[in-house]
Image: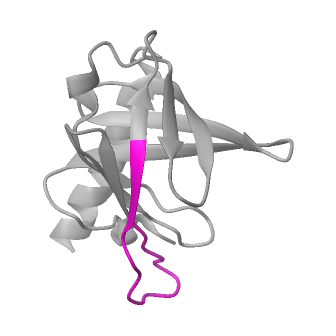
């Protein structure tokens, strides 16, 4: 129960920090590390690891339907203005807009077929989904 309360408070504080931060990544090194996505309504709560060699590992998680998933390795590149992360994999390429960013949280957005999607992330120290936040 205490852990759930802590995670809930962390999410509330993280949401406030996202709103108060800048909408760009000032230094590419700030992006490095493990970022856990707050769960979407369908239970998806992926974790992405940005590495210093320009590679990213996406660890897919679904809180509604837990199961073993294969890690997706992609290349990433931060735009010069720090406002866009370009992702390239053998299967697809897409851009993520930096909507908010600070040392502990970030919000990214993209548009798919006219639908705007926003993804909120919390920086972590291990590959673990935030399923405790899933309703």
- Residue 93 spot, x, y in % from top left: 60, 46
Residue 127 sits above or below residue 75 on the image: below
Say which residue appears at 13% left-offset and 53% top-offset.
125
Q: Main secondary structure of the magenta part?
A: loop
Please report the bounds of the magenta region as a residue range.
59-75
The structure's colour scheme is one colour
Q: Camera-side residue: 8 or 120?
A: 120
Q: Is residue 34 visible?
A: yes
> Residue lying farthest left?
125
Q: Picture quarter containing residue 101?
A: top left
- Quadrant in the picture for the N terminus: bottom left
Residue ID at (41%, 52%): 74
The question of residue 72 being in magenta is answered with yes
Residue occupying the point 43% across, 11% down: 80
Residue 95 percent coordinates (x, y): 59, 35
Q: Is residue 5 left or right of residue 92?
A: left
In the rendered image, the vertical position of residue 98 relative to residue 125, given as above or below: above
Residue 110 % position (x, y): 65, 39
Which percent across, then down, holds residue 127?
A: 22, 64
Q: Is residue 66 above or below residue 31?
A: below
Q: Is residue 79 magenta?
A: no
Q: Looking at the picture, tell me which residue is in the foreground, 130 or 93.
A: 93
């Amino acid at each position: 129960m205490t852990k759930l309360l802590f995670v809930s408070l962390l999410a509330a504080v993280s949401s406030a920090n996202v709103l108060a931060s800048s909408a760009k990544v000032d230094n590419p090194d700030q992006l490095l590390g493990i970022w856990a996505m707050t769960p979407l309504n369908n239970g998806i709560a992926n974790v992405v690891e940005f590495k210093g060699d320009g590679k990213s590992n996406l660890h897919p998680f679904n809180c509604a339907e837990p199961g073993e998933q294969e890690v997706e390795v992609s290349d990433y590149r931060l735009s010069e203005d720090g406002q866009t992360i370009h992702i390239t994999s053998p299967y697809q390429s897409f851009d993520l807009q930096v909507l908010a960013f600070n040392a502990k949280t970030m919000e990214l957005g993209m548009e798919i077929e006219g639908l705007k999607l926003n993804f909120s992330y919390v920086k972590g120290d291990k590959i673990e989904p935030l399923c405790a936040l899933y309703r």
